[in-house]
Each structure stands twice: as structure tokens, then as C-alpha cells.
């Protein structure tokens, strides 16, 4: 079932509400998720994206993944799968131009090593639509994620969302009050 999952690995309900609220507020049509895991977030993004929108999700090929789940298993047999494009590969090695960007919303929740977070972050900023939003999951939970995001926050307005493991960058933060 789409709602059955191990809490701790995937986004929790509060984090899901934050991400989906932003998805709706900016009327995202192109979303990129780094780190598919079981596809719980992917499925929810696809169920709430604007009509005609697409969710692109990237995860390591099964033989390289260190997790014990079937990547994308939550959306494989759901009608929302028609709005999802699954890519397999190392997000730091892929040509992000081939993923279908620029994107309105990007969620970084792949490898938690600092070099990966930094490279994914660099690629996210290079492939973000004007007015787009970037989320980092596991901020404040994994030191290397937090450290990489904090270094980027010296140049960009990135904030933590209290009570979650999320940090967020909003490209058009001046219009935030309009939400």
C-alpha cells in the first residue's frame, strides 16, 4: 500500500505536508527528486502535481543501492505512475540536462555524503526555474547534509523548517507573502 512505510527513512507526514503545500503554491509542473527510495514521496508528488506535470526521480541502480527496498515500489502499479519518469544512475555523474529541466521544485534526498550533497546542490541551482524551490531532506539529522547546506546558505537564503528534517531555498522569496 502507498501509505505503508518505515518512518525514519522517508519523509514523515509533517514533511510531506510542507513539500506538497509548496508544490501546490508554486503550481509546479516539473519536479525533480534525487533519491527515490520506495517512491512514497514520488507518488504523493505525482498525485498533487499540476495537470500535465511530470515528476522525474533519480536513484542508484539496484546493484549499487545500499538500501533494502524495491526502488519506486510505492508507485509502480498506481495510476500516478504515468506522471513519473524514473532514472537510474549516480546523480553526481548524470547529465542533469537529460532529466527534463529546468525544474520548478527539486528535492535532494540522495546520498548523504557531503560531496554528493554539494554536487547535487550545485546541479539543483543550475537547473532551477526562476521562482523555483529546492528542499533538502535530512537537514539537522545527518551532519554532512547539514554542513553542506549550511555552507551554501552563506551565499543563498536557505532556511530550516522547524520541527522537520527539511531545509528550503525559495528563489522568489520576495513573493513568499503572496502564498
Image (cartoon, rainbow, N blue to C red):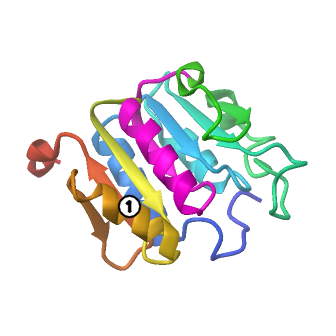
Describe the element under mark 1 as helix, strand or loop. Answer: helix
Q: Depth check: give the residue in front, 46 or 176.
A: 176
Q: Quadrant of the N terminus?
A: bottom right
Q: Position of residue 175 (x, y in %)?
A: 11, 42
Specify the quadrant of the image occupied by residue 82: top right
Query: Which residue is at 64% across, 31% downward?
Result: 94
Say if 149 sits above or below 118 in the image.
below
Say if 178 sits above or below 100 in the image.
below
Query: Which residue is at 71% across, 55% downward?
Result: 37
Say if 39 sits above or below 138 in the image.
above
Q: Is residue 116 magenta?
A: yes
Specify the quadrant of the image occupied by residue 23: top left
Say if 25 sits above or below 136 in the image.
above
Number of marks present in the image shown: 1
Q: Depth check: give the residue in front, 148 or 164.
A: 148
Q: Residues within 10 Å of mark 1 (few under 14, many from 20)?
A: many
Q: Is residue 122 magenta?
A: yes
Q: Position of residue 157 (x, y in %)?
A: 20, 55
Left/right of residue 28 with respect to residue 93 in the rendered view: left
Q: Please state the extent of the stretch shown in magenta in the rendering.
A: 100-126
Q: Position of residue 26 (x, y in %)?
A: 29, 38
- Residue where numbered disc 1 is placed: 149
Q: Is residue 47 visible?
A: no
Q: Position of residue 141 (x, y in %)?
A: 50, 78
Query: Which residue is at 51% across, 45% downward?
Result: 120
Left/right of residue 136 with respect to residue 98 in the rendered view: left
Query: Which residue is at 57% across, 52% downward?
Result: 116
**Can you name the residue that lies furthest to the front here?**
115
Q: Depth check: give the residue in front, 158 or 8.
A: 158
Q: Is residue 173 visible?
A: yes
Amino acid at each position: 500500500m502507498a501509505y505503508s512505510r518505515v518512518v525514519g527513512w522517508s519523509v514523515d507526514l509533517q514533511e510531506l505536508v510542507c513539500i506538497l503545500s509548496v508544490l501546490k503554491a508554486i503550481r509546479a509542473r516539473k519536479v525533480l527528486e534525487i533519491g527515490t527510495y520506495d517512491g512514497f514521496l514520488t507518488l504523493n508528488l505525482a498525485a498533487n502535481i499540476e495537470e500535465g506535470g511530470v515528476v522525474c526521480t533519480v536513484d542508484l541502480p539496484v546493484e549499487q543501492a545500499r538500501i533494502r527496498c524495491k526502488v519506486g515500489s510505492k508507485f509502480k502499479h498506481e495510476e500516478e505512475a504515468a506522471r513519473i519518469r524514473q532514472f537510474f544512475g549516480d546523480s553526481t555523474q548524470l547529465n542533469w540536462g537529460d532529466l527534463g529541466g529546468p525544474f520548478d521544485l527539486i528535492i535532494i534526498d540522495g546520498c548523504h555524503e557531503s560531496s554528493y550533497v554539494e554536487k547535487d546542490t550545485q546541479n539543483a541551482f543550475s537547473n532551477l526555474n526562476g521562482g523555483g524551490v529546492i528542499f533538502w531532506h535530512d537537514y539537522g539529522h545527518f551532519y554532512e547534509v547539514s554542513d553542506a547546506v549550511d555552507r551554501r546558505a552563506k551565499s543563498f537564503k536557505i532556511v530550516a523548517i522547524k520541527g522537520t528534517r527539511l531545509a528550503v531555498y525559495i528563489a522568489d522569496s520576495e513573493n513568499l507573502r503572496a502564498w
